[in-house]
Image (tube, rainbow, N blue to C red):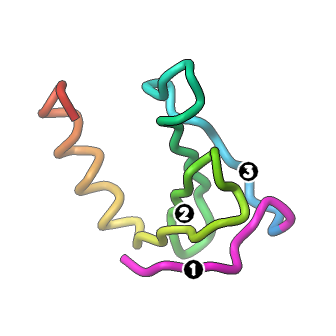
Amino acid sequence: MSVDENVHASSGLAWFTSSHSGGGGGECVEVAAGTAAVHVRDSGNRTGPVLDFTPEQWASFVVFAAGHPSV
């Protein structure tokens, strides 16, 4: 994982909001799949830092989260 402070809405990435995000706007996560990384950001701070994961790291997280309903 790395943090990229320069990946923003103008990067041409298609950002998707988590279906598990709260309706109040304070708990929203957005994800965008790039060619070499999966990017994750806080939708309440779209110009803030972005976490970058390799596709393998992201796949491992998704498998873990699917097995833990409280995540």
Mark 3: which amino acid?
Ala
Q: Residue at x 48, y 72 (%)?
A: 52
Magenta segment? 1-10
Mark 2: which amino acid?
His
Provide the residue designation for mark 1: 4
Q: Tell me which label, 2 or 3, sits earlier in the chain.
A: 3
Q: Nearer the viewer, residue 39 or 33?
A: 39
3 is higher (above) or lower (below) than 17: below
**At numbered mark 3, what does the secondary structure look like: helix, strand or loop?**
loop
Gap between marks 2 and 1, in whole Å?
A: 9 Å
Q: Residue at x 47, y 36 (%)?
A: 27
Mark 1: which amino acid?
Asp
Q: Tell me which label, 2 or 1, sits earlier in the chain.
A: 1
**At numbered mark 2, what does the secondary structure look like: helix, strand or loop?**
strand
Residue 5 % position (x, y): 62, 79
Gap between marks 2 and 3, in whole Å?
A: 10 Å
Provide the residue designation for mark 3: 14
Residue 71 % position (x, y): 22, 35
**At numbered mark 1, what does the secondary structure look like: helix, strand or loop?**
strand
